[in-house]
Amino acid sequence: MDKLLTDYDVIVVGAGHAGCEAACTAAHLGAHTLLITLDMNKIAQMSCNPAVGGIAKGQIVREIDALGGMMGIVTDRSSIQFRMLNRSKGPAMWSPRSQCDRMKFSANWRQILEETILLDMWQDEVTELLLENDSVCGVKTSLGVSFLAKRVILTSGTFLNGLMHVGRVSFAGGRIAEPASYGISTQLKARGFEIGRMKTGTPVRIDGKSVDFNKLAPQAGEDDFHCFSFVHYDYKNQLLQRPCYMAYTNEKVHTILREGFADSPLFNGTIQSIGPRYCPSIETKLDTFADKTSHHLFLEPEGETTTEFYLNGFSSSLPWDIQWRALRSIEGFEQVRIFRPGYAIEYDYFPPTQLYHTLETKLIRGLYFAGQINGTTGYEEAAAQGLMAGINACLSLSSNQDFILRRDEAYIGVLIDDLVTKGVDEPYRMFTSRAEYRILLRQDDADVRLTPKGYDLGLVNKQRHNIYLDKMQKRDALIDFIQQCSVKPDQINALLESVQSAPLKQGVKLIDIVTRPQINLNFLAEHLFVLKEFIACYQIRDEIVEAAEISIKYSGYIERERMLADKLSRLENLVIAGKFNYEELTNLSIEARQKLSKIQPRTIGQASRISGVSPADINVLLILLGR
C-alpha cells in the first residue's frame, strides 16, 4: 500500500489564505507539494469580510504580489469595487482595498492551484503529525492515510478545537457549518508547545431584497489605473462593479442589544479567550464606548449578482433574536431579513515566540506555522505568512539559506518580526503605525523593494520581472527628463495661477514646478505640451507617472528615512543566535535573562525590540561581542 502514495517535499495543512499561498509558492519553487484541506469546495474562503486590503493590509498584498505570490492576481480577478484609502494623506498612507465576489475569489484560487505543476490536493482532516525524534516527517489523516514529507506547514486557521457561540448556544466547528479539527493541539502540547485560545467573530448576513437602499448612503468605487497586481497594469475588470452602503445604529438599537448582554458569551463568562481589539463586536463597542449614541455600519455586497450582504461593524455573538430585532430598528432595515446571525468562534493558537523568523518552529525541525495559528487576524496577514513559510520550507530543502525580510524592507518583515519577537496578547492586525519606516514601505514601490528578491529566489517569472524592469527604466527616464527640462513663465504661469500657485518670474527646471504641493504630475502633463509629448512618446503609463511624482516630491523624506534605517540596520547584522547562555550572564537583568532565553533572538536588533530588555542589557551584549 505504501507504494501507492507519493512522498512529498512539502505538505501544507489547510487551504485558507495562508495555505493556498504556501502551497502555490512551494510548488512554484520546485517542491513537490501536497495541499490537504477539509473541503475542496471552500478553498480560500472569505469567511468574514468579502474584501482584501485596507490600511496597511493593502500594502501587504502588493508586497505578496511583488514577490511572486498570487493574492493580488486573485483579488483583481474577483473585484467588484476598488478604492484607494487615505488619499487625503501622504502616499506612505495610501492603502488599496478591493471588495470581492466571495465565490469567484474561491473559484479563482482553486483554478490557480489546479493548474500549478507539482501541486497535488487531498480532501481530508489531518489529525496527527508524523515525527522522527525532533523532526517532522509527514502527517496522518482521519481516513488513516499517512503522507510522508520533509517539511510540513500548518495553516489551520480557526479550526483547531474550534468552538462557536450564538448567545447561550455553543457548538463545535471551525467555521459555520464546518467541523472543527482535533488531535494536533494535544500532540504538540505533549511535545512542549505553549498553546493559547483566541476569539474572533463575524456579523449577520443580510438579504439585500429586504433592505431599503434609498435610506442608506452609497459608497461607490474608483475607476482608474490602480489595482493590486503589478502584472495587471493594463487589466480591464469585466465584473459588475457594485457600491457599498453606510448605515448607522441609534439609541433604540443600543437598548435592544443591551437586553441580550446577560446572554452574551462575551459578558457571562462563557468566552474566556482574547478577542481582536481593533475589530470589536457591536456589544463590545457599546460596553467600551457607552457614551456614544451611534456607530456607523457598512453594508457590503458578497458578490457580483448575489443579494447576500455583509454588515461590517455589526460583528456579534448575541442571541439571534436580539440581533434580528436590533437590526430592524436601523433606518433602512425596518423589514430586513437575514440569512444567518453573527457568531463568535474560539480556537487554539500557538504563541509565535516559539518560531524562528523563517516561521519554522523551534521545537520541531521542518514544521512551519502560518496564519491564525500564530495569533494573527486577517486574510492578508495570513497570506503573507503562508508565502514566507513556503519560501523558507523550500529553501531549507536544498540549502541553509533563509529568506527573512527586514523591517525597513517590507510590512511583511514588520509583521513577522513583531510576531516572533514580541509575541501577541490579542489577535494581531497590521497597521501603518506598526512600521518605523512607512515612507520606505509604500504600496506604490512594493515591486521596487521586493521584485528583484523574488526573481533571485525563482518565484518571480521572467514576464513579471520584465514588467518591473520596464517600469524602472521609464520611471527613471521621466524623472531625468523632469530634472533637465526647462520651462518659461509664459508656458506655465496661467496654469500655476489656476491652482493658486505663485507664478514664475523667470525660467526654472520643470522639477521645481513638480515639487510644488498644488501640482499633480498628470494634471501638469495635460496642460504642458512638452511633458505630455514625452510621456506619450515613451508610452509611460499612469502608474509610472505616479511613481515618478512620489519619488520627486518625497525624495528628501525618503532619503532621510533611508539613512536612519541604514544606521540602525547595523544592529540587525550582529548575529547572536547560539552565542550566549543568557542565564549565565549575571550582568543582565533577571527579566532580560528570562526573555532572551525564551525567545533566543537572532540578532542584537531583534533583542533590542524584546519587551523587558533594556538599552543597558543591549550594551552588555555589545561589550561581550567586542563592540
Image (cartoon, rainbow, N blue to C red):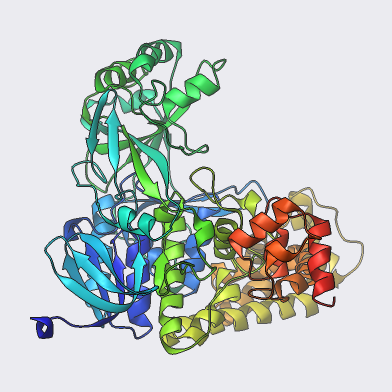
Residue 83 percent coordinates (x, y): 48, 50
| The quarter of the displayed image where residue 578 is located | bottom right
> Which is more toward the observer, 523 or 49?
49
Residue visible at 27% across and 23% down? 168
Q: Is residue 421 above or below residue 234?
A: above
Question: Which residue, as the protein is rendered here, is positioned at the far right?
Answer: 505
Position of 21 relative to 245 (above/below):
below
- Residue 504 at x, y = what percent? 87, 61
298 and 154: which one is in front?
154
Identify the residue at horizontal 74%, vertical 68% (top origin).
Answer: 552
Q: Is residue 245 above or below residue 294?
A: below
Q: Residue at x 48, y 45 (%)?
A: 427
Residue appearing at x 34%, y 53% in the figure? 157
In the rendered image, which quarter contains the N terminus?
Answer: bottom left
Residue 236: give x, y in percent of width and height.
Answer: 36, 65
Instruction: Give left or right: position of 162 versus 559.
Output: left
Along the line of sight, which residue is nearer the eye, 518 or 383?
A: 383
Q: Residue lying furthest left in this view?
A: 1
Q: Position of residue 525 (x, y in %)?
A: 65, 66
Based on the displayed image, in which of its 4 quarters is residue 35 positioned? bottom left
Q: Is residue 233 visible?
A: no
Is residue 422 in view from this perspective? Answer: yes
> In which quadrant of the rendered image does the C terminus lie?
bottom right
Q: How many marks?
A: 0
Q: Toward which corner of the image does residue 539 lie, by quadrant?
A: bottom right
